Image: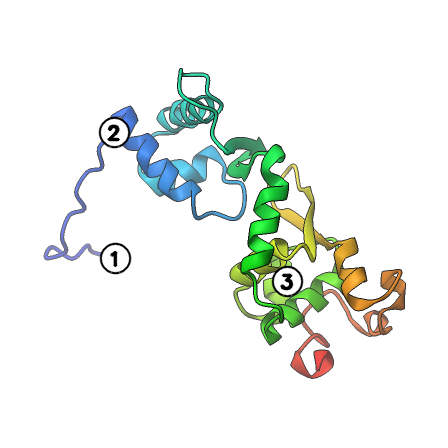
């Protein structure tokens, strides 16, 4: 395929450490899954060694190791990828704030996503999206914020986070165990069949 001679040539991105770090921060603020150094390097248009150096510098800065204050969040490496997390000591205050801001009722999309996770857990965001055939990123964030699901574990090979339901869901449903849910899971296979809107309604 011949390149279009009229197409604009992308401007080179600054490669100085400060510029790379700022671009990384912008990316890390919006990702929901840990990102490998390679994927971060591709996203910010910088060499992997420069990204590794910038990530380590950001992590040290957030931890107060460079003379500044310790931040309320931290940059952690999980499952071979990097992601921003709230510091553990602030989990309660963040959870309380989010719960007071959240609406009392879940949307239909959130209910359907929650049902998929409840029956298929532990399950990744990608698997849920495949079953529902829609993007579920914002819905999963809502369910996490409401304390209805949690991160169970991270796949060490892919970095994919596996989600499961919490005891808070049992409390909200008024049941003692997931075994008390309607027994529709034996009718489902590992794909999307059977988990359309009709089953969930």
Residue drawn 69% across the image and 84% down it: 198
Name the residue that disc number 3 marks.
128
Per the image, the residue denoted by label 2 is: 15
Residue 125 falls in which quadrant of the image?
A: bottom right
Q: How is the image coloured?
A: rainbow
N-term mark: 3 or 1:
1
Quarter holding the N terminus is bottom left
Location of mark 1 (residue): 1
Spatial distance from mark 2 to mark 1, Cα to Cα? 30 Å
Alpha-carbon neighbours of circle 3 within 10 Å: few (<14), some, or many (≥20)? many
Q: How many marks?
A: 3
Q: Which residue is at a point 35% across and 25% down the rendered structure image?
A: 50
Q: Position of residue 192 (x, y in %)?
A: 67, 71
Mark 2 touching mark 1, by CB under 8 A? no
Q: Nearer the viewer, mark 2 or mark 1?
A: 2
- Describe residue 109's horizontal placement relative to residue 151 as left or right: left
Tell me: 123 left or right of 175: left
Residue at figure coordinates x 50%, y 34% from the top left: 72
Task: Say the numbered circle drawn on residue 93.
Answer: none
Q: Write down the quadrant of residue 93 in the picture.
A: top right
Residue 66 vs 2, above or below: the answer is above
Earlier-in-chain disc, 3 versus 2 = 2
Residue 107: image location, x then y, percent: 59, 73
Q: Residues within 10 Å of mark 2 (few under 14, many from 20)?
A: some
Q: Is disc 1 placed on a helix, strand or loop?
A: loop
Examine the rendering and report whether any part of residue 80 can be seen: no
**x then y, percent, for residue 9:** 15, 48
User: Pointer 1: residues within 10 angstroms few (<14), some, or many (20+)?
Assistant: few
Query: Looking at this view, is 82 or 188 the one in front?
Result: 82
Q: Nearer the observer, disc 3 or disc 1?
A: 3
Residue sitting nearer the eye, 104 or 53:
104
């Amino acid at each position: 395929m011949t390149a279009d001679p009229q197409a604009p040539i992308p401007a080179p991105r600054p490669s100085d450490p400060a510029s790379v770090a700022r671009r990384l921060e912008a990316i890390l603020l919006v990702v929901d899954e840990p990102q490998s150094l390679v994927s971060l390097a591709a996203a910010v248009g910088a060499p992997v060694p420069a990204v590794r150096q910038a990530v380590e510098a950001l992590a040290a800065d957030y931890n107060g190791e460079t003379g500044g204050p310790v931040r309320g969040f931290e940059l952690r490496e999980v499952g071979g990828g990097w992601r921003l997390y709230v510091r553990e000591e602030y989990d309660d205050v963040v959870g309380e704030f989010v719960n007071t801001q959240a609406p009392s009722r879940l949307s239909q999309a959130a209910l359907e996503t929650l049902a998929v996770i409840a029956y298929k857990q532990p399950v990744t965001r990608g698997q849920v999206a495949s079953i529902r055939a829609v993007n579920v990123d914002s819905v999963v964030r809502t369910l996490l914020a409401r304390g209805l699901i949690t991160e169970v574990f991270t796949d060490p090979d892919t970095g994919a986070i596996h989600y499961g339901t919490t005891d808070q869901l049992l409390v909200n449903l008024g049941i003692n165990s997931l075994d008390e849910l309607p027994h529709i899971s034996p009718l489902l296979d590992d794909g999307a069949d059977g988990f359309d809107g009709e089953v969930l309604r």
